[in-house]
């Protein structure tokens, strides 16, 4: 559909690879773009993109399940097992109820976000355009998609025109964080309100790590860019810009200041945050906050020579630690391999190649401004990274792996040197 002449403002065909890139970026809620969304795509093209990141945000299986519920079709055991994997649940019971809550919560948050944004956009853009922009950006923010229609103020400007607009930025921040912590966490909060001690271990870890990352990101961006990108801002505006940069770097792909003009320290921090991403079972990508927590605690336990992994008075199995280590190892390997491939076919620096690959694999959507200039080979690599980052490399490997049966005997053990 994005290839069709009706999808572009010029009425011309969009090259298939470029349309595929955009469709993948939208469906995988990444936000990397080859064209400015407002300047290139017509209303039809924008609506196609909107539906893609809405479905990609709440999950394809969630949409299919809601259709099944609507048609009063019975959901079998196999479908429930698939839903457990796609939503990040740890048990089979209650998965259909959670799916219903996911859709209701998503629509509620997006509606409230759109209403708040419309109060600001309608006076600026007119009623019809203001409401449409409010809906588009609310869904994009909640789904952590990073697509925007602010090209009317300058191509690829994203939220640069609203960097100091407190109502707009704070609304988007709340939507991004809400969509980025995960639906299981939102369901816990819905049930237990603000009784932290009653939350599941997953919810406690996600909320704690998310809070720590946001706080330290705010402080570091404030210090790094105080006399840089934020030099002309007032003190409250610097705090707001730092907070937004801290949050959007991990998940959403929106930007209020030019990423390419950030200091080297800020660029490294952005890449780190993109690599981590948001919560498991959320609209965000990355290795996830719970994986980071497990790796950090595993390192702490190793230095203390502790055999058990204890978090919030709960014991985690060795299998969970191995799973977390596998995810990070695979992500690092893929990032380096993809950066090597891209830098070999494009005249890019190592920083630019790494930034682009981390952004694609973490479905973060930020760029140093090189995405529109990529060649066919590099675009293909980025498409594969976005798809894999949204689906998950562990999921991909398990899908193609053969079932392994351990032998009935045990091999002799031997120690090796580590570190």
Image: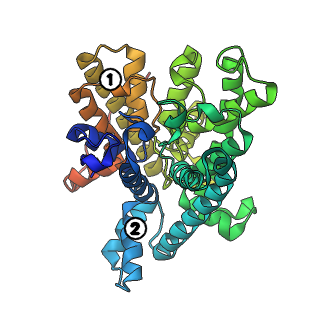
Closest to the observer, 20 or 264: 20
* Residue 118 horizontal/vertical position (percent): 64, 54
Q: Residue at x 41, y 80 (%)?
A: 69
Tell whether 206 sits left or right of 8.
right
Closest to the observer, 105 or 236: 236
Q: Residue at x 29, y 50 (%)?
A: 6
Q: Residue at x 38, y 41 (%)?
A: 326
Q: Mark 2 highlights which residue?
A: 63
Q: Earlier in the sequence, mark 2 or mark 1?
A: 2
| Kind of element beneath mark 2 | helix
* Residue 149 horizontal/vertical position (percent): 50, 42
Residue positioned most to the right: 235
Q: How many residues crowd around disc 1 within 10 Å: few (fewer than 14), some, or many (20 or more)?
A: few
What is the CA distance from the residue labelled 2 to the residue labelled 1? 35 Å
* Residue 251 horizontal/vertical position (percent): 52, 41
Closest to the observer, 415 or 219: 219
| Kind of element beneath mark 1 | helix
Q: Can residue 151 be seen from the camera position used here?
A: yes
């Amino acid at each position: 559909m994005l290839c069709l002449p009706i999808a572009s403002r010029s009425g011309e065909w969009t090259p298939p690879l470029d349309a595929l890139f955009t469709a993948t970026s939208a469906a995988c809620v990444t936000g990397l773009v080859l064209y400015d969304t407002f300047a290139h795509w017509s209303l039809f093209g924008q609506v196609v993109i909107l539906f893609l990141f809405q479905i990609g945000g709440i999950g394809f299986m969630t949409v299919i399940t809601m259709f099944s519920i609507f048609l009063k079709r019975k959901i079998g055991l196999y479908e429930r097992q698939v839903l457990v994997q796609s939503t990040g649940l740890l048990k089979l019971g209650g998965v259909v109820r959670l799916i219903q809550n996911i859709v209701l919560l998503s629509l509620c948050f997006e509606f409230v976000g759109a209403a708040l944004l419309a109060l600001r956009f309608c006076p600026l853009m007119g009623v019809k355009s203001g409401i449409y922009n409010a809906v588009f950006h609310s869904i994009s923010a909640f789904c952590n998609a990073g697509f925007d229609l602010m090209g009317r103020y300058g191509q690829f400007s994203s939220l640069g025109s609203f960097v100091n607009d407190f109502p707009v930025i704070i609304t988007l921040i709340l939507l991004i964080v809400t969509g980025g912590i995960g639906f299981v966490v939102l369901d816990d909060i819905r049930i237990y309100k603000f009784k932290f001690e009653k939350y599941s271990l997953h919810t406690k870890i996600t909320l704690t790590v998310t809070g720590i990352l946001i706080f330290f990101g705010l402080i570091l961006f404030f210090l790094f860019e105080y006399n840089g990108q934020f030099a002309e801002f007032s003190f409250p505006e610097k705090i707001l810009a730092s907070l937004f940069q801290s949050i959007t770097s991990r998940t959403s792909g929106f930007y209020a200041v030019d990423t390419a003009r950030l200091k080297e320290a800020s660029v490294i921090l952005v890449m780190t945050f993109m690599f981590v991403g948001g919560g498991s079972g959320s609209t965000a990508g990355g290795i996830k906050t719970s994986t980071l927590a497990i790796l950090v605690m595993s390192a702490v336990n190793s230095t203390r020579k502790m055999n058990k992994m204890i978090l919030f008075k709960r014991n985690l199995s060795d299998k969970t630690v191995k799973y977390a280590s596998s995810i990070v190892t695979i992500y690092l390997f893929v990032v380096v391999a993809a950066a090597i491939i891209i830098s070999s076919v494009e005249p890019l620096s190592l920083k630019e190649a790494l930034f682009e690959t981390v952004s694609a694999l973490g479905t973060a959507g930020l760029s140093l401004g090189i995405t529109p200039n990529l060649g066919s080979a590099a675009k293909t690599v980025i498409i594969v990274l976005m798809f894999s980052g949204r689906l998950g490399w562990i999921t991909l490997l398990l899908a193609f792996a053969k079932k392994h049966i351990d032998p009935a005997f045990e091999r002799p053990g031997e120690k090796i040197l580590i570190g």
